[in-house]
Amino acid sequence: MTANKTGETGAQEPQNGADAQTNTPLADNASADTPPRRRGPSLLVLLPLIIFAGLVLLFFYQLKSGKDPSILPSVLINKQAPDFALGPLPGATYEGKPVPGLSRADFDGKVTLLNFWASWCVPCRQEHPFLLQLAKDDSFQLVGIDVRDSEENALGYLQEHRNPFARIGFDKTYRVGIDFGVTGQPETFVIDKFGCIRKKHIGPLYTELIDKTIMPLIRQALAETEPAEGCATAQDPAPAKAAAKPAPSSAGS
């Protein structure tokens, strides 16, 4: 009887040992099934939200300050217009005559309203009637620079909407646009008869802007007899150096 009990006990030991072996993997599986700790969103995910929030704050600041967000500061204000020379848009006409190209020299002696435009520019179509109206005033010259366009599309645009520009520079590579700091179309510059940039407007022209800002500035520029402070004309000679004092003659010479 004792032997049988011992045998039974001995037969159970391997079974208990087997249970112990099978329990260990179960514990491992339980730890493997535990979901990993969740991490917060990365900086790359949050960055667009931060930028958007900053733009929203800037927009509301502009509204609170009462400033026109389309009027941005430019390093070229009251500075000479960049030097450039652009060929004409082939086939374009103005008052029945071929439209010449545009260069920096064409600003000298004339108050100029310079408009950067393109046939693919939707806001340009919005402001086009205002340009046609401004073209009727011959006290200043209205000129345009067509940017990043094809000759065919640009010419078709003018034929459809009529050409308000007495001169057109064809800036296919956008080189001149970059020199003027143009960031989009349309943009308009008021340039006085000394070749100095007096104003930059981003976006389409509209009645209030023309009546209260553009035209008063043009009339002011027409009446001026000298360039704005800090804007020397391209023809101004360099300041003459003070003449050197003659060396004193030696005594008895």
Image: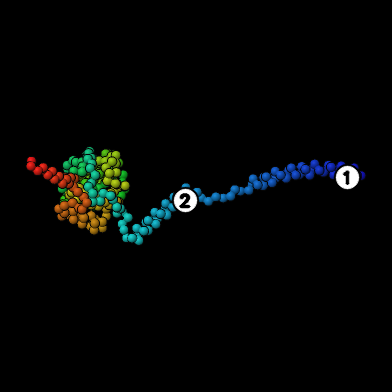
Label 2 Cα crowd, 10 Å radius (few <14 / some 14-19 / many 20+) = few
- Viewer-closest of 177 and 208: 177
When the figure is inspected, residue 83 is found, relative to residue 225, above or below; the finding is above
Which of 182/225 is in front?
225
Q: How far across and down, in percent of the image, does residue 108 sit?
A: 17, 46
Q: CA distance from mark 2 to mark 1?
A: 71 Å
Say which quadrant the N terminus sits in: top right
Residue positioned most to the left: 252
**Dot 1 amino acid type:** Lys
Residue depicted at x 55% and y 50%: 39
Q: Which mark is residue 46?
A: 2
Is residue 52 or residue 143 the one in the foreground? 52
> Going 9% across and 43% down the picture, which residue do you hit?
251
> Position of 102 compared to 15: left or right?
left
Dot 1 falls on a residue whose secondary structure is helix
Towards the viewer: 81 or 118: 81
Residue 87 in view, yes or no: yes
The numbered dot on residue 183 is none
Left or right placement of residue 116 versus residue 58 in this view:
left
Q: Position of residue 123 (x, y in %)?
A: 30, 49
Is residue 124 shown to the viewer in this render?
Answer: no
Structural crowding at the residue carrying mark 1, measured as other residues with C-alpha within 10 Å and reported as few (<14), some (14–19) or many (≥20)? few
- Where residue 133 appears, x then y in whole percent? 21, 52
**Number of callouts in the render?**
2
- Determine whether the residue tagged by mark 2 lies in a helix, strand or loop: helix
* Residue drawn at (25%, 51%) of the image: 77
Q: Amino acid at mark 2?
A: Leu
Query: Looking at the picture, how far across and down is residue 217, in whole percent?
Result: 21, 55
**Residue for badge 1:** 5
